[in-house]
Structures are given as C-alpha cells and as structure tokens.
Amino acid sequence: DNNPICMSFATHMFGNGIGTLRVLKRSQGNNDESVIWKISGPSGNRWYQARVPVSSPKPFQLILEAMVGNNYLGNIAIDNIFLRPGTCPIFPQTASPNSGDCNFEENTCGWTNPGLTDQFDDFDWARQFSYSVSGPGTDHTIGTSSGYYMNLVSSSQLPQRGGNSAWLVSPQFPAATTARCMAFYYYMYEKTIDPSGPSLGSLRVYVLPSSSSREFSMLTPVWRLNNHQGQRWLMARAPIVLLPEGKPPTEPYQVIIEGIWGADRVGYIAFDDISFFNGDCTTLPSKATTMNGECSFVRDMCGWTNGSKSEQSIPLFEGRNGFSRSHIVVATQSRQFQLDEGSLTWRLASTSTRPANLQDHSFGAPAGYAFFDIFNQNVVQNPILRSPKFELALVDNRCISFWFAPFGRGESTTLSVVRVGLPASDAEPENRDVLWRFSTRMFDTSRPDWNYAQTVVKTDTPYTVQFEGEATDGGFALDDITFYEGECETRPARAALTEIEV
Ligand SMILES: [Ca+2]
Ligand SMILES: [Ca+2]
Ligand SMILES: [Ca+2]
C-alpha cells in the first residue's frame, strides 16, 4: 500500500544572496528524482514550518538540497524535521503553485468560485474563519477559531433555496500518469436531524476532463456524502478518476467541489486542507463511494434512460406478478399512437413542468426528480425508465431503495420495479422478474407526497433495473435511487409481490 506521509521541517532563509531550497524524492531502483517542494529567494528573518505531502509506490529517499544564489550574503537553515503518516497540504503555497493543495489560510490557492453568469452554480463558497460565522468553531489546519476554511453559507441578501449549489473549481491539472488521490477534511453537522427527510444538503467531488467543456449532462461524483456526519472534522479521500471507467484522466482536468443547500437546514457544510498525492486511493469514508446507477436527479438522469418500444414488447406475463394478457394487447395498441413522446415518457421535473407542485425529495428543491404524467389517455401507457447496465457483483444481493410519489386521478395507476437479467448472447431472451409493484387503487393521490421504498435485487447475472409505469390518467414521481449491498425487506409492505397463478 502506498499511504502518503507528511514531511514537515522548519526553515529560515534570510539574506539577499539566498538561492533555492528544494525537497527531492528519489525512488529506489532508478535515479528518478522529482522535485516536490521548492522555494527561491529570501523569506524574511524568521523561522516557519514547511510541509510537503510525500507518496510513492516504491521505497524512496528524501533529499533536502540548498543552492547558493547571486552572492554569499545570507544563509539557509533547517531544523525539526518530522515525518508522520497521513497527508497534508503543501506549505507555503508558493512551494508548489497550482498543486491544488490548499489550507485556505492565505487565499484559495487558485481554486475559484464560478460566478452566476458562468451558469454552473447558484451561489459561492465563502473562505472564512469561525468568528461570528455560522460554521465550525475551528478550522482543521491550525485548530483555532482564527484558522480559515471554506464554508457553504447563505446570506440575508442572497438567501439560498433547497437544491441550490455552489462549486469551487480547482486549477487545471496535467493529465494523470498514475493513480491519483485527493485528500481533504470535511465538516457536515446538523443541529437538529429531521427523520422525515433530508435537510442539511450534500457535499460532492467531481473530476471534469478539459474536453468536456460545458457538457455537464453526465457529471458523476467520485465522492459524495449527504446530510449529517458528525460534529467534528473528518478525513476524506476521493479517487481522481473519470467515471464510469474509473481510470485516471489521460487529459488535463479540473476538480470540482460542490455543496448543495438543503431546504430546512440548521447546521453547516465546510471543508479544509486539500492535498493531492499519487497512489491508489481508497475512498474515505467508504460510504462516500458513488454506486453506479444511484441518482438524485439534480441535473440529469445519471445514465437512466427511457426504455424503447421494443423493450415494452417483451411479454409482460413472464414475471411472477400476475399480469393478465390484456396488458399485452393494450401495450401493443399504445405503440400505434403517434403522441407527443415527451408527455408519455419519464422526464426530469422543472419548475415549469412538474406534477402538482411537488418538490424534490433530495433537497426540497423546486425541481430535481424524475416523473411520468399520463394525462387523459384512452389506452394504458407504459413509460419505462431503464438503469445503466450492472455487471456481476461480489455480493449475491443488492438492495435498491428509492422515494416515490403517486399522483393523478387514475384509480389504478401502477409503478413496477423490474429486474431484467441480460443474456450472454443476443439469441437468448431477456429474463424479466417483477420485484416490486405499487398500485394507487384505494390510495389517496390528491396531495402527492414522497414515500420510501426498497426491495432486493439478485446480482447473479448482469442486469438492468426498470421502473415501469402503467397509467391512463396519472403518474409517479421518483427520486433518490440508491443501492446497498445485501438483502432488505420490501417496503412499503403492500408493494411486495405474492405468487399468483397466471
Ligand atoms: Ca458560484
Ligand atoms: Ca485552514
Ligand atoms: Ca432529487
């Protein structure tokens, strides 16, 4: 394992003849030396503690190298060398400009807040210390109330709404030649935790390749946590990879740290002490790992797509759900209609197009979920939302959880969760298995509200998951799809399927 260490040393560089002090890393087995810290010129008649993170896949030596400048006036001194496990932002910042490392004590080290006109986000991260601020009482770097950190704040002039996001964007880094990791500390604290729903918000990290320019339609976080995590600074590590491949970026890239505002938050989200190092990177905490297919529908559908008509023609009675043959006939008829496709498929809610003024579940935002809304149709419509493909997993079972909200006038609008086992060859049929089914029969849909749902999915073959609607006059909203490893009971209980003779 190549866990990084933090090297720190005191140095004193005074006099107009001062040249350069460098720290070099020499890897065993070759004469490869790399400069990992470098300061040129005098830095005043004082000592300060320098820091540099060191990581290497091989054994290595560290070299402190001093060079004389224009004349012999002055001296470079070093003292108090410490090595400790863990990483640290490089210090002073000028020892490695654009390294991305930052303790935020002097400035934001080249990380920037996009403005409103950039149309990336809605508000800004604030570089602050704790005095009179709604935020952590101390920073992480120096552990006092005068230390700086980045804080997600609202103001009386610009009050934030649920779902609003703020980005902090790194300097551009060169293409990564090896695995790379970003370490940082975060503080996500909620004073009162409302069990009925989320309230604090979200902290997310993205890797943005330079070629993607403004194409953000498929930004998948490499690290994300939601809501309360504790009343203290906690360590985080995020792999610097492009998803879904999970490989280090082979082109220049930037890192984005996004904070999302929760609607009813009483607490704070902050971060401090960013440092980058080379080496394999285990996501910390492990629950910050993004699962393929999870989605909170913030700005896209995370790889979920509308199922094609041909997929709908798969006989519905093959499941163990007791569908009648009449459904198949109805599905066939519906394909003959050339209706406005958008109104018959799953789509993202927006402030202008959303059912019954329903708010987003994730953050209480005005929009940010998926829904279908079938209005006054003569024949049953079957909008299908299909997941990305899931490969074989190490575990036998996975639990899919999500939130749903039924609405509309239809007496028997139905939502089903279907596992579609993908065959090894095209010659074999897909293997459908209905896992979960909820009908609005005898259910009050006059005021749509979010309901929690979960059910178990077998992972013994590659598969996709489908949300399949059936409606003539009504619909379902869907949000916060998440996967957990292991089994779970079906919720709500009435959505569990019982064996029915077809
Ligand atoms: Ca901004
Ligand atoms: Ca700090
Ligand atoms: Ca959402």
Image: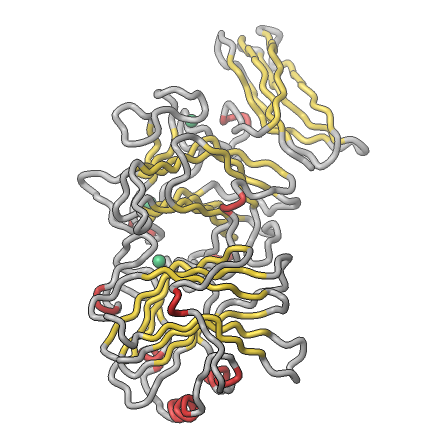
- x%, y% of residue 207? 50, 49
Q: Quadrant of residue 133?
A: top left
- The reply to whether residue 397 is visible in this rendering is yes
Above-or-below relation of 351 to 1: below
Q: Which of 172 and 276 is in front in this view?
A: 276
Single out the residue that lies furthest toward the right.
29
Q: Who's the residue at 61% across and 42% down the image?
A: 281
Q: In which quarter of the image is residue 40?
A: top right
Q: Who's the residue at 58% across and 78% down the image?
A: 431
- x%, y% of residue 204? 43, 47
- The reply to whether residue 215 is visible in this rendering is no
Above-or-below relation of 300 to 314: above
Q: Who's the residue at 21% across and 43% down the image?
A: 158
> Is 70 left or right of 477, judged from the image as shown?
right
Please state the total of marks drawn on the protein image: 0
Q: Quadrant of residue 259?
A: top left
- x%, y% of residue 153? 29, 38
Above-or-below relation of 96 to 269: above
Q: Nearer the viewer, residue 183 or 67?
A: 183
> Is 228 left or right of 17, judged from the image as shown?
left
- x%, y% of residue 416? 42, 74
> Is 255 left or right of 37, judged from the image as shown?
left
Image quadrant of ligand 1 equals: top left
